Image (cartoon, helix red, strand yellow):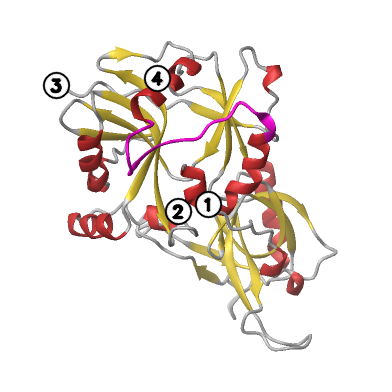
Amino acid sequence: MTHPQLPSPMLAKAVDTVPDPSRVDGGLSYEPKWDGFRGIVSFDGETVEIGSRGSKPLTRYFPELTTALAELLPAPCVLDGEVVVAIGEPGAQRLDWEALSQRIHPAASRVAKLAAETPALFVAFDLLSLIGDELLDRPFGERRAALEGFASDLPAPLHVTRTTRDVDMARRWLDEFEGAGLDGVVAKPLAASYAPGKRTLFKIKHHRTADVVVLGYRVHKSGSGVGSLLVGLYDETDAGDGEGASARLLGVGGISAFSDKRRQELVDELAPLVERDESGDAVLGEGERNRFSSSKDTSFVRVRPERVVEVRYDQMEGARFRHTVQFERWRPDRGPRSCTFEQLDLPTAYDLGDVLV
């Protein structure tokens, strides 16, 4: 048999709160929002391929998954779901984005090593085809029932995501499951067909604010204006006692998505703070590099850490913001030294195993 042409994944649009099912014809089904790589699994009866949301197939990066799923799946099918990596001992497990990101590596030897050290799971949340029967035009309620009948009894590393039609339960999940590393909640219209590439689902993510210090800025790719602001927080872990105690100012992320007009305004606003050398030229700093940006120019214009800005963020990944943060407002009332990691709202720990069940 041959693998079918894989559809583009169905997408979700962000909303501020968990929507009420009474406002959607046919009602809603709610499920955890998994923080991983979106994957479309295709099994032709012999081999497994994993397509991605983008143009890069995931098959070669997760050999342990393709091997296991080829053995577990009882019939040719196409599954929509998420590839995730869990860390920690049973009873204290959580998803780990960094460990998952490390799995995308060009060297086959490294891929094999990481497959053994940080094996991935596949969490299925939709069934698009079964034994050649295309299900995309059927309502999600029917596809979900078919998925449960087909895969709910299959063992790890395949899991079928939990769902509920109780909006109050979904709101509790939004709070509780973050402690296991999940990203929020997704609401799916029960009567909707599968719409590849369309944002017909609803995603509800965590949004918080923090006051951070501006460290510098990168010039926009056009060569004019501010492309992104680099921001940081003070780490008082090694600082001594007292007002004058020293603390490290660590970079924690960036702010982007400014309009053309705003990019130019920011250059003027930050000009008095730009650090300059003896000749009057702006001092450049060097940003962090990773395997995805090894050839990318990561330099930035350094500014004196005197301005504080309030940003909106969803979650942290270690000591950095997980995603690009959003500009909220300047905070002239806040001193830079008051911007520490202690202000951050961290989730209560929650065992991933209790989410997978």
Q: Which residue is mark 1?
A: 181
Q: CA distance from mark 2 to mark 1?
A: 8 Å
Three-letter amino acid code of the residue under disc 3: Met
The foreground one among 106 and 261 is 106
Q: Residue at x 17, y 33 (%)?
A: 47
Give the mark toward the camera: 4 or 3.
Answer: 4
Q: Residue at x 33, y 43 (%)?
A: 156
Q: Earlier in the sequence, mark 4 or mark 3?
A: 3
Q: CA distance from mark 2 to mark 4?
A: 30 Å
- Quadrant for residue 230, please give it: bottom right
Q: Earlier in the sequence, mark 1 or mark 3?
A: 3
Give the mark toward the camera: 1 or 4.
Answer: 4
The residues colored magenta run 152-168
Within 10 Å of disc 1 (Cα), the crowding (few <14, some 14-19, many 20+) is: many
Q: Is residue 164 magenta?
A: yes
In this picture, is 204 found above or below 291?
above
Three-letter amino acid code of the residue under disc 4: Ala
Within 10 Å of disc 3 (Cα), the crowding (few <14, some 14-19, many 20+) is: few
Q: Residue at x 65, y 81 (%)?
A: 247
Which label is found at residue 1? 3
Secondary structure of the residue carrying tag 3 is loop
In this picture, is 226 found above or below 21?
below
Three-letter amino acid code of the residue under disc 2: Trp
Q: CA distance from mark 2 to mark 3?
A: 34 Å
Secondary structure of the residue carrying tag 2 is helix
Give the mark toward the camera: 2 or 4.
Answer: 4
The foreground one among 36 and 144 is 144
